[in-house]
Amino acid sequence: MSTPYFGWFQIVRLGLIQACLGAVVVVTTSTLNRIMVVELALPALLPGFLVAWHYAVQIVRPRMGFGADKGRRCTPWMMGGMLVLGVGGVMAASATVWMAMQPLYGALLAMLSFSLIGLGVSACGTSLLALMAKQVPEDQRAPAATTVWMMMILGFAITAGVVGKLIDPYSPQVLLQVSAGLSVLTALITAICLWGLEKTVEPVQPASPHGASEPVEKQNFNQALQEVWREPAARRFTVFVFMSMLAYSAQDLILEPFAGAVHGFSPGQTTQLSGWHHMGVLIGMLAVAGAGSRRVAGRLGSVQDWMVGGCLLSALATVGLCSSSLAVGWPLRANVVFLGVANGAFSIAAIATMMRLAGEGGPGREGTRMGLWGAAQAAAFGLGGLLGTAASDLAHALLGEQRTAYAAVFGMQALMFALSAALAWGLRNGAAKREPLRFGPVFLLKGRSRS
């Protein structure tokens, strides 16, 4: 016996949980970042290290997913993860306040706090995606992914705006109150959304094609992970996620400096440029969902077509950034919007593919597979910013000229996108068969990602 497939009401409830997750994370990675650097005059390296550390902690995602598989329920892991995340958020705010008086002890507490944040995101985010893979029907996966990720982005935007107003003018007491209130509110919303969402199911014994004879409940984590890693599609998709997300995240920290140093954009103009990129990402996400409307079902390609095409167009757009560093009068804003559209298209197609592949090797391993791919994404995001900035500094040192240096870095990113497209093509023609887009209602999406 299995549970009925989720309808749009249940999908929106999952989207609210994802929005709550994003709300807590955006305060710890953005608001606290600014307070450490501006109000406390601490080195920017400190918040950068803390954000990278919370990504490093997410290497535990496969273990979290295995726990959900073994218990056959994702609800406890989502609720527990949100509670751990909320505690980590409050501790991070307390650590930031403490840094004003005792920088060393505050930094140590912050490291512990960001460890909890990484654990909470891993438990909640991995289990949420695993539940979607199990319960969302095949013809609604891309619009469901779009809905959930759009709600997360909405959570980012609303939280950033509201928290920004509440803590202005800044005071440590207000920061602690707002952080505590946010954690309590998100925990309550998550509990309400989870109430009765996941029905009890009968134990399912996976019929693994790779020779695993033990049931899920009797296997240990290493056995389960090895079984998943023996699946060719799972291995290839892991490499694809890492490569594509590495290319995606590597541009984040160098796009605005590039626009300022090479094109003479002011700080306000570079911020607007990032806004244009995000707008393009949203357009690309919506395009994948819109292509699957019943009127055009199957005529605009498969999920894998969009994944391959999005990576190729991302490579082309990044080559455009290379050209813009060497050409005069290049339409940089249009290039950045084009890059965003391509990024959004391939990321939503990748999430839809992820949900399908999670159950393709047999039931009972959805959480472990999602955890493996989530760990690959977290590792890529943690390394991406470091790789992008380090490559930029190295190119400047070796080439001694800004335009050529930035062109070299963007060229490297274009190559990574092209390699990602090749991996996606292998999934399209190999383990992942061509599947027409036959989506239900077009959505009223990272991440990739990026929980």
Image: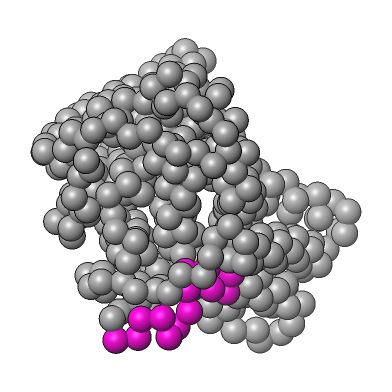
Left or right: 350 in relation to 316: left
Can you give x and y, in whole percent of width and height, for residue 183 in the image?
A: 22, 32
What color scheme is it?
Answer: one colour
In the rendered image, residue 349 lying in the magenta stretch gets the answer: no
Left or right of 403: which side holds 145? left
Query: Residue visible at 50% across and 38% down?
Result: 208
Asked whether the viewer can see residue 160, the reply is no
Is 7 left, or right, of 423 in this rendering? left
Can you give x and y, in whole percent of width and height, for residue 356 in the image? 43, 55
Q: Magenta segment, which residues?
A: 295-309
Residue 49 in the image: above or below residue 418: above
> From the image, which quarter does the N terminus lie in?
top left
Q: Is residue 438 above or below residue 103?
A: below
Q: Quadrant of the C terminus?
A: top left
Can see residue 308?
Answer: yes
Asked if 238 appears above or below 308 in the picture, the reply is above
Most frequent secondary structure within the magenta stretch? helix
Residue at image position (47%, 24%) is 214
Residue 298 inside the magenta-drawn segment: yes
Tell me: 27 left or right of 369.
left
Question: Which one is in front, 440 or 415?
Answer: 440
**Residue in the image at 27% along x and 49% along y:** 135
